[in-house]
Amino acid sequence: MWTSKGSRIPNTQVFVNENSEEVVAPIKIGNRYEVYDVLSVSGGFGVILKAKDTRLGDRTVLVKARRYDKENGLFSYEKDRSRVERIEKIRQVTRFEYDCLIDFKTLGEGRIPNVNDIVEDFCPSIYGPHLSTDGNLFVCSDYIAYNEPYIIMQMINGINLSDYLKCGIKNIMISRNYKHYKSWERDVLQYSLQLATILGGFHKKDIENYNRYYIYQDLKPENIIITDNLFLTLLDFGAMTMVIEDANGNSKSNIEGCGSPGVGTWGYKAPEMNNPSKLAKLDRRVDIYSLGASMYHMLTGENLSLTLKDEYEKIPVNNLKEFRCTEYTYKIVKRCTEYNPNERYNDMMEVKNDIYNAFMSRSEE
């Protein structure tokens, strides 16, 4: 739950949640979209805002914005000459995200938001004020703070899956009139099948373009909207990254202007994403890991970002047995989240087949 308050920066506002986290946002973007709430925050670097389209009868839209206040060292020195170049590279990622959304919609993926527009305007988290390492407050020039790209997307009606899971598995089962955990497990398998299908679409190779495909990198319940207790929609594509695979199956994931390898959320991102030496060679198996981590969260209600001690701790998959999770589902989650990527599923089709078989076995009971 976010509440708004005034800001010291003209034409901006501050949103605060129950954890005292703050998001500074423009009051109006592109002289058209009036921002009134925060839908979600992703990984500390991205935020999705709710806004009214004043040219279309105050219709609600979503605005994908970038946060710069947590970029390491970006505002350490007032006269940092590299700042403009770093910001422009980050903006390239936003434009790449926009292009990906357009491409996936063109290919017929219906479980992602429709993109209405991309608008350039003022960015308060670039403007400041910032505290330099020598203790001085400073603001950035309008030249740097303007021209920030904002992605305008359709509003998705539903509830954030992470917020939904905060109710607790027992309360969710009560609200759905379920008497047995196996009914909730069946729903999780159905959700997981949808997610595997979406991710599998991203992983589909474009043979005419050097065997390229895309990895999502940041799958987690917080980036998912659930509608009518049944349908899932992915929200945030800021971590989307292109991968090129050669004839020998070797992957290259550090392609200039085509995403940021290694961007993800602690608890849900694959272990190899924490190793700088491996960021240039990430592949589809990072999404397989985060799918397994998200399944674990859905099956237990346990937010891994809050419960794991550090980025090296393994997901306690054995906890699934305390929920009387079936052996079939347990093995899927375990294989997806193996620490060594070579011990995971090789591709999303293998995952889908096992999830489908587990779902069918649950449905027949």
Image (cartoon, rainbow, N blue to C red):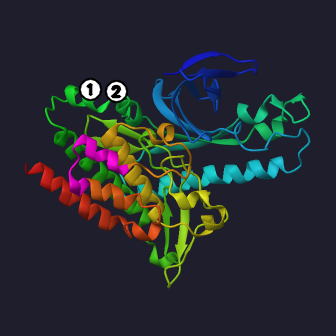
Mark 1 surroundings within 10 Å by alpha-carbon count, few (fewer than 14), some (14 through 19), many (20 or more): few
- Considering every residue shown, the one lying at the far left of the view is 365
Q: How many marks?
A: 2
Residue 202 at what x, y percent from top left? Answer: 43, 61
Q: Secondary structure at mark 1?
A: helix
Q: Please tell me in which quadrant of the rendered image residue 253 appears.
A: bottom right
Residue 315 at what x, y percent from top left? Answer: 43, 50
Hey, what amino acid is under mark 1? Asn
Is residue 107 visible to us here? no
Hey, what amino acid is under mark 2? Cys
Q: Please tell me in which quadrant of the rendered image residue 227 appears.
A: top left
Above-or-below relation of 333 to 345: above
Residue 299 is a magenta residue: no
Above-or-below relation of 340 to 189: below
Position of residue 269 in the picture relative to residue 254 (left or right) = left
Kindly identify the residue that appears in the image at 56 percent across and 23 percent down. 19
Residue 190 at what x, y percent from top left? Answer: 24, 49
Residue 318 is a magenta residue: yes
Kindly identify the residue that appears in the image at 51 percent across and 56 percent down. 100
Q: Please tell me in which quadrant of the rendered image residue 141 appears.
A: top right
Q: Are marks 2 and 1 in contact (CB under 8 Å)?
A: yes
Q: Which residue is mark 1?
A: 171
Mark 2 surroundings within 10 Å by alpha-carbon count, few (fewer than 14), some (14 through 19), many (20 or more): few
- Considering every residue shown, the one lying at the far bottom of the view is 247
What's the magenta bit mostly, secondary-structure-wise? helix
Residue 250 at what x, y percent from top left? Answer: 53, 78
Is residue 315 visible to us here? yes
Near-viewer residue (257 or 271): 271
Per the rendered image, the range of residues in magenta is 317-329
- Considering every residue shown, the one lying at the far top of the view is 6
Q: Which mark is residue 167?
A: 2
